[in-house]
Image (spheres, rainbow, N blue to C red):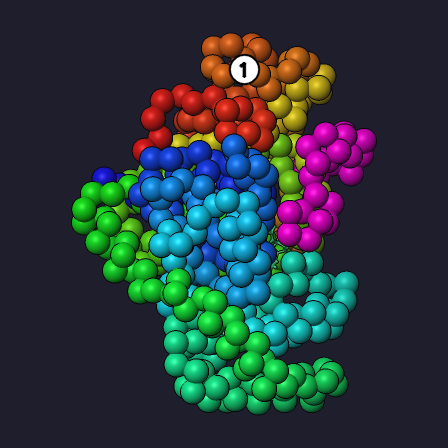
Amino acid sequence: MPAMVVVGAHWGDEGKGKVVDMLARDARMVVRYSGGNNAGHTVINSFGEFKLHLIPSGIFYPETTSILGNGMVINPATLINEMDDLARRGINIKNRLFISDRAHLVMPYHTLLEGLEEEYLGGAAIGTTRNGIGPAFADKIARLGIRTGDLLDKKAFLERLRLVLALKNAIITKVYDARPLSLHEIYDQYCRYADRLLPFIRDTVSMLLDALQKGDNILLEGAQGTLLDPDFGTYPYVTSSSPMAGNAALGAGISPSRITANIGVFKAYCTRVGAGPFPTELKDQTGEAIRERAHEYGTTTGRARRCGWFDAVAARFTTRLNGFNGAVVTRLDVLDVLPTLKICTGYRLNGKMIDYFPGSVDILSKCEPVYEELPGWQTSTRDIRSYARLPANARKYLSRLEKLIGCKIKIISVGPSREQTIMRGNVW
Ligand code: IMP
């Protein structure tokens, strides 16, 4: 059977946590393939409400194995907190949660250096989550990273840490004039983490390949959104690992040919956290009303999310790039109260219409959105469970989105719980 990937289609926070939690019911394994604890996936189910930053949102099914893939960077303190929280609330993680021995570790100097770099950038700061994610991925590519598998041999780990930390301390002290970090403090702290995490660290790639060979369903859980991709997003206002479907195979360790279902998750409107251009941003009362009604505040940092109308230019771009063969629209219910809705169908650039998403942030920030207006439905959709029962104007809105993005909407979410979902056929 296939592998399915679930990808954020705008700037993240599309509601992938709920979608993965639902789809994981039919999966034997769920694998996070990118990012780190910059992500924040909210899941509400019969066990309660959970904010997951690292552990895949499939952890709630007893028969499902959850894997932190090689494409992730892992802050061990956050992971241990998350594991303890789940255990405290009755979710068994033993023999069900595994960490790739190839995943990289977020180290204290990553968090410190990211803070110093953001301060240095001043007005040009990226507005990162300050969790050290960018520096950890930079070290991976610069071949200065430390991987979870390195914790298996404490002596070798000490030597590796000694080598890397000397370089980092030189930057911390000589470039930023800040206080150096202590080798022994970090070593002792990470040895304690190692003692907790060792039973979970595995060669997860063979586990996955064996599962695929047996015909098991594998769900690949994305983090962030395509417009935060370092290549195709609004560079430099992006994250540091690829959230896209194309990276799912790499970040989990399977062949791309195994991925047959490729699901893009869109919110019924758009949001963005941090700096960078956002053509349909609403800096008015409507934007404020959406933020308050939807409680659009970051799961990881608590920052207010910028809110705006659905950007179909961006959505069409990310759909074509990822090759989505199914779409999910979340938070439709947030729009229940609005008298009219707008969808951005094109951009005006220097007086001319364009219908593509520019590669340069300078150009994108000069683009003015061109809107199509649709009537709202002004009635609650929260208790509706079938497409046919949605108000006619809600169906019109969704079918217009479907046409503009060029992909069938297979799932519609009308509230945070698992039940508040409208399915339109099979997604696997
Ligand atoms: P970083 O990933 O912490 O380096 O942050 C880089 C950019 O990505 C910032 O604009 C963050 O706000 C944004 N970002 C990172 N993770 C998420 C997420 O899970 N949801 C939404 N935005 C995110």
| Nearer the observer, 124 or 203 | 203
Residue at 67% across, 47% down? 298
Residue at 47% across, 80% down? 144
Q: Is residue 318 above or below residue 116?
A: above
Q: Can residue 293 be seen in this view?
A: yes
Asked whether mark 1 and ligand 1 are closer than 8 Å, the reply comes as no
Q: Position of residue 45 (x, y in %)?
A: 52, 34
Q: In this view, does 402 lie to the left or right of 376?
A: left
Q: Where is residue 52 in the image (x, y as percent from the top left)?
A: 55, 49
Residue at 62% across, 23% down? 333
Q: Quadrant of residue 23?
A: top left
Q: Is mark 1 on a helix, strand or loop?
A: loop
Q: In this view, does 21 lie above or below 133?
A: above
Residue extending farthest to the right is 285
Q: In this view, does 428 lie above or below 56?
A: above
Q: Is residue 369 above or below residue 133?
A: above
Q: What residue type is labelled 1?
A: Ile
Q: In which quarter of the image is residue 253?
A: bottom left
Location of the N terminus (image quadrant): top left
Q: Is residue 138 visible?
A: no
Q: Which residue lies under the disc numbered 1?
A: 384
Q: Quadrant of residue 209?
A: bottom left
Q: What stretch is highlighted in magenta?
A: 279-304
Q: Which quarter holds ligand 1?
A: bottom right
| Nearer the observer, 87 or 191 | 87
Magenta stretch: includes residue 282: yes
| Nearer the observer, 29 or 305 | 29
Magenta stretch: includes residue 403: no
